[in-house]
Amino acid sequence: MVRRSFLSVLLLALLVPFSLIGQQSIELGGLFQGENLLVVNEPSADGVGFCCYEVRVNGMLTADAVNSHAFEIDLTSLGLPLGKGVSVSLKHRSGCVPRILNPEVIQPSPGFELVAFDAFPSGEVSWTTVDEHGRMPFVLQQFKWGKWVDIVRLDGRGGSEEQVYVTSIQPMQGENLLRLTHLAPDGTLEVKGEARFQGDVPEPTMEYDQKSQVLTFSGPTQYELVDEFGTVVLRGVGNTATLRYLSRGDYFVNFGAGTELLKKR
């Protein structure tokens, strides 16, 4: 029985082509931007066939003509919507590596030209762009509580043509300073111009009920609670915040345009 098992394993090993031993792969991920990937595919190290022998996009085998010195990974034929996440896997033989000539087409870096950026006391904010480097989201930030805080996120449309975006924010009392950023998949930010206006709105107040452990604001507001170590432990937008899951201690409550100390006992 042992001898038969050994012979079976040996026969299986002999049936596997030598050129497929030590198979490797290149993995690439990003966002579909309407362009295809170009690959240089050298002959395999043993002279049998070419280096890359299989391509998969989002786990699906493609029909790309990999049996050549150069080929195109035809993403445009797959029906992917612009901005859709893509993962590309190129399987290749040992001793050689195919080269992707333009990986940047699915790994866009943030960037755009800002034509206009306006903000008004009513809370309406608008901006106009051209030459957006990919369909990446815009993050509108507001300076408050001594730092830049994300307040609105809108998906970018991409492309070289002019694009107009309109949104609204909750103004706060005094100066409202805003800036516009473009967010890449790797977290890189492209920061562009600033806009500001003077807000003339009532400053919200807060009350804390120790029994129900609910924090109530006098009006809708963006808020966050920061512990004594400077860690944000709770954030949100609204009229109330439930604190029953927070440990006892002192917290700084950032809301409206200012900060107050809260003692949870």
Image (cartoon, rainbow, N blue to C red):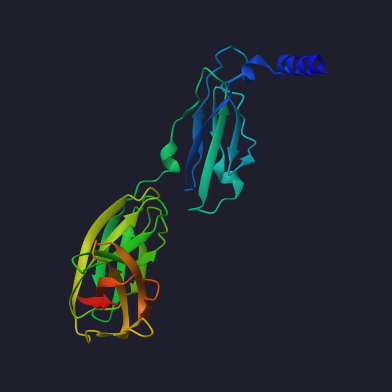
Residue closest to the eye, 166 or 109: 109
Q: How many marks are shown on the rendered structure?
A: 0
Q: Please give the name of the residue rendered at 21% of the width and 77% of the height, measured from the top-left corner.
A: 260
Residue closest to the eye, 196 or 27: 27
Residue 47 falls in image quadrant: top right
- In the rendered view, tell whether residue 168 sits above or below residue 36: below
Where is residue 82? Give x, y as percent: 50, 53
Does residue 2 appear to the left or right of 81 in the view shown? right
Where is residue 87? Give x, y as percent: 53, 43
Q: Please give the name of the residue rendered at 56% of the width and 17% of the height, measured from the top-left corner.
A: 44
Q: Please give the name of the residue rendered at 65% of the width and 15% of the height, measured from the top-left corner.
A: 18
Residue 46 falls in image quadrant: top right
Which quarter of the rendering shows the N terminus?
top right
Does residue 181 appear to the left or right of 57 in the view shown? left
Where is residue 107? Give x, y as percent: 42, 43
Residue closest to the eye, 172 or 51: 172
Does residue 239 appear to the left or right of 203 in the view shown? right
Does residue 259 appear to the left or right of 62 in the view shown? left
Where is residue 215? Give x, y as percent: 33, 81
- In the rendered view, tell whether residue 107 sits above or below residue 142: above
Q: Please give the name of the residue rendered at 80% of the width and 14% of the height, measured from the top-left corner.
A: 3
- In the rendered view, tell whether residue 19 sits above or below residue 132: above
Which quarter of the rendering shows the C terminus?
bottom left
Residue closest to the eye, 193 or 224: 224
